[in-house]
Amino acid sequence: MAHASKRHRKNLERVDATKLHTIDEAITTLQNLSPTKFDETVEIVLNLSVDPKKTDQLIRGSVSLPRGLGREKKVIVFAEGNQADAARKAGAIEVGGEDLAKKITDGWLDFDVAVATPGTMKFVGKLGKVLGPQGKMPSPKAGTVTDDVAKAVQEFRAGKIEYRTDAGASVHAPVGKRSFAKEALRENITAFLDHIKAARPPSAKGEFIEKIVLSTTMSPGVMIAVE
């Protein structure tokens, strides 16, 4: 705390860490805090009553947010032939097979999402140690291993997000920018929460969503009441 900036200390004083807010109250609280010099990303964290060590309780997937994320994502595609052409036309920043895998192995990671056709997983499979820790490894559950690469590129560029439970049974996701209108943030947050609720595994016990925290890139967290 001694090394916290003056802005951050002021923001901490303005947030009651024990209070549960409605979604609108949480958004208003964050947007009324002292801003940074850049347009911060609004992020949501959900603590779930699941055991991420059990495969039948691992929550992973993707969802399109109705109001997008405020910027286009950089999407790369592992594809060949006609599918490679379709990916380029859809706006992928890099398309390839073994050559693209080598480029990543050599250290290039300037992209947000990696999409792959099933036929190119022989190249992608070797990248697990590189892409896995960054959450960029293509997966059928996340909708990033598909034959319809053009659709995947369009959706992820426009604001479709991937998510998965971490080791602490939490799900982290961006839901927009601080500069968004309150209505746009509310729509994105509500859509994400509804999607996660629908993804509840049958083996999950008790209250599925135990805690919800909303924050911006550089702000304290604001708790939202679980409905």
Image: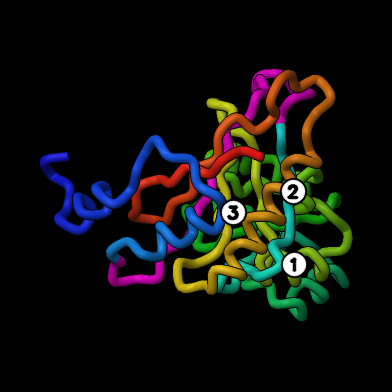
Instruction: Please state which amino acid type lies under the numbered disc 3.
Output: Lys
Circle 2 Cα neighbour tier, 10 Å, few/some/many (<14 / 14–19 / ≥20) = few
Give the side of residue 30 with respect to residue 142, left or right: left
Q: How far from the left and from the top, in percent, is residue 213? A: 49, 43
Q: Which residues are magenta?
A: 35-58
Q: Which residue occupies 54% across, 73% down?
A: 181
Q: How far from the left and from the top, in percent, is residue 83? A: 85, 68
Q: Is residue 53 magenta?
A: yes
Mark 3 vs mark 1, foreground winner is 1
Q: How is the image coloured?
A: rainbow
Q: Which residue is mark 3?
A: 102
Check disc 2 and report its element: helix, strand or loop.
helix
Instruction: Please state which amino acid type lies under the numbered disc 1.
Output: Glu
N-term-proximal mark, 2 vs 3: 3
Instruction: Please state which amino acid type lies under the numbered disc 2.
Output: Asp
In terms of depth relative to the viewer, which is nearer, 80 or 21? 21
**Outermost residue toward the bottom?**
89
Mark identifier at residue 194: 2
